[in-house]
Image (cartoon, rainbow, N blue to C red):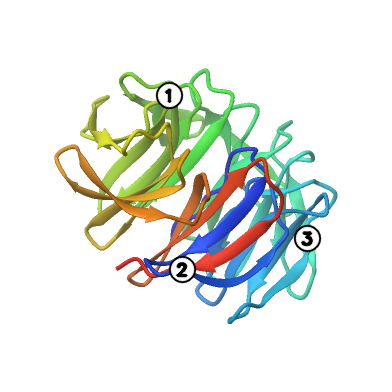
Amino acid sequence: MYVTGKINVSGNCKICRGAVNQYIGHEPLGYCVPLIYNGTNFYQGGNYGGYDYVFRYDGGTTWTSVGKCGTGSAVCSMAAIGTQIYAGTNVVGKVFRYDGGTTWTDIGTCGSNTDIRCMTAISTQLYAGGGQDGKVYRYDGGTTWTSIGRLGASTCVTMMAVIGSQLYASSTNNHVYSYVSGTTWTDMGALTGESIAWSLGVMGSQLYAGSYPNGKVFRYDGGTTWTSIGRCGSEERIYSIASVGTQLYAGSYPTGTIWKYESGTDWSSMGRCGSESDVFAFVVKGTQLYASCGSGGSSGVYLRETVWP
């Protein structure tokens, strides 16, 4: 499972799963609109009526509200450990645990951050990335979050990824880091010619990063070496990367296109999620790829699925 959440964008969001579009209902969500699957259900968070709500997909065109997370204005990120789901919010910068029904329990803040930009887990250990201080935090129970270090001079942790038991994080200073211990991170280098490392993705034991402003995907080749494996069309940003088996995919802005990696530096378009401009997040369920897509500047969230063969 791949979990993500980022970017302050309001807009329409659709969940796509393939080549033939099928609407599966909608809720008027906005802002980041992260998507997760906990082995039983899909959950999507965002801004609903000015607050941080989460909705659960119940089949057909039915999405059911599972409640509001405190007093923030949006859910920025989500993660799951087994069937237990967590949500990170903005404005108040808190993390909440879902306890069933419409009940969310406040499990604390991460330093002085006003938004929790991304979340992930290794086994039963939960981690969160700060949107203002560039630090990664480890959840230590109750309402305690412990900083495990800052990513260089970065002010924002854009994404985290896990390979085995190794934690990786990308940043707005265009570098990617691997966690060592304590508060120590190893700088794995920068994405040549880019300004921001926006996203991370994994295929097997291989790590990939997506960039801004040239919309490229980079493969990590050890040390501080990142090799460009091509630009996705004329896109500016790669917001999401995921793999299904041995096939790599990337989601981009500003055309909201899903791209399939071919070889060398070649990518082929798998089409757009309607008229959306952003592919915010991917989730892999079995052999199927789901994408959460949206548009900045418009209101509401529209959820649909399509099948990407």
Can you tell which of label 3 and label 2 is closer to the viewer?
2
Which residue is the site of mark 3?
105
| Residue type at the position of mark 1 | Asn
Give me the residue at 63% from left, 39% from top. Answer: 146
Judge by depth and name the residue closer to the eye, 273 or 2: 273
Give me the residue at 63% from left, 46% from top. Answer: 32
Asked if labels 1 and 3 touch by Cβ distance under 8 angstroms, the answer is no
Q: Residues within 10 Å of mark 1 (few under 14, many from 20)?
A: many
- Disc 2 to disc 1, C-alpha distance: 35 Å
Which residue is the site of mark 2?
21
- In the rendered image, residue 156, in percent from the top left (x then y), is placed at 57, 29
| Residue type at the position of mark 2 | Asn
Which residue is the site of mark 1?
174
- In the rendered image, residue 133, in percent from the top left (x then y), is placed at 63, 26
| Residue type at the position of mark 3 | Thr
Q: In terms of sequence position, does the residue under pointer 2 or pointer 1 come before the other?
A: 2
Judge by depth and name the residue closer to the eye, 16 or 128: 16
- Name the quarter where the C terminus is drawn: bottom left
Q: In terms of sequence position, does the residue under pointer 3 or pointer 1 come before the other?
A: 3
